[in-house]
Image: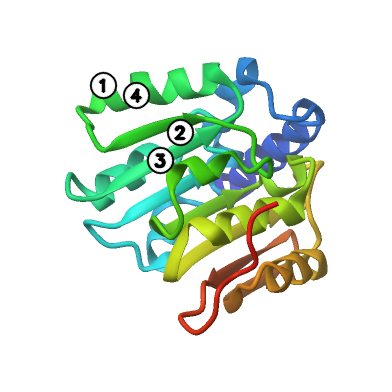
Amino acid sequence: MRRWWLVVGIFALGIGLGWVLARRRPFSARLAWFLTLPGPRAIARPEELVALLDLQPGMYLLDAGAGPGRLTIPLAEVVGPTGSVTAVDVQPRMLEYIRQRAAERGLTNVRLLLAELGRGTLAALGPETYDRALLVHVLGETDDPAATLRELAAVLRPGGRLAVIEHIGDPHDVRYARVRELGEAAGLRLLQERRFLFGHTTVWEKPHDGATKGAA
């Protein structure tokens, strides 16, 4: 019983500290160490995302707002050398963390892109390029969430999936109703959802029958 309360306490501490540290947009690269704490690591675990997105070897994944690569690196190992993960972040230092970690793991399938989401810069990646995409605690940090989802929809292949994850521990949390509104406006179809006390996860699919609305 004491161990259970210890886990709960660490998780709560992580959430509380995160609220204080993450008020700035974007989350500072100087505080990347925070994302390695037990509380943040318990949210959006790689193995859960693999199952939610049905991520397979050989797939092309876009990690939008990748930060220091907490998810980029393990998911690059899942897709393997025949697939790839593109990590997008607006801070060069975050991308440097990813580059270093990928080199340490011997990964050659990690691409880096310095870009601000929702500004049309993802168009450089090419339309309908990715099988899967992630947006974990990032949507509320963008200046234009609607344009961000349209941009992500544009780079997904028909049948491709996007996971959007939000938690109330994040000071930029986007409520469930708003995410649904924006996802549907971007031309995506809600495939799966998980709603719970402290947040929600939605998995979206780009339809085969009809073009999504273009990026702003």
Q: Residue sitting at 81 percent across and 70 percent down?
A: 177
Residue linked to disc 2: 69
Q: Residue sitting at 56 percent across and 61 percent down?
A: 153
- The numbered mark, 2 or 3, whose residue comes first in the sequence reads 2
Q: Residue sitting at 47 percent across and 51 percent down?
A: 45
Q: In the rendered view, tell whether residue 101 sits above or below residue 47.
A: above
- The numbered mark, 1 or 2, whose residue comes first in the sequence reads 2
Q: In the rendered view, tell whether residue 51 sits above or below residue 67.
A: below
The reply to whether discs 4 and 1 touch (Cβ–Cβ < 8 Å) is yes
Instruction: Give the mark toward the camera: 2 or 3.
Output: 3
The reply to whether discs 1 and 2 touch (Cβ–Cβ < 8 Å) is no
Residue linked to disc 1: 104
Residue linked to disc 4: 101
Query: What amino acid is at disc 4?
Result: Arg
Whether residue 215 is visible, yes or no, is yes
Q: Quadrant of residue 172?
A: top right
Characterize the local packing of mark 4: few (<14), some (14-19) or many (20 or more) Cα atoms within 10 angstroms: some
Q: Determine which of the numbered discs, if any, sits on residue 113 in the image.
A: none
Q: Determine which of the numbered discs, if any, sits on residue 86 in the image.
A: 3
Characterize the local packing of mark 3: few (<14), some (14-19) or many (20 or more) Cα atoms within 10 angstroms: many
Gap in angstroms between the C-alphas marked 1 and 2: 13 Å
Tell me how many marks there are.
4
Q: Residue sitting at 80 percent across and 27 percent down?
A: 24
- Which color scheme did the rendering employ for the protein? rainbow
Local secondary structure at mark 3:
strand
Q: In the rendered view, tell whether residue 120 sits above or below residue 202.
A: above
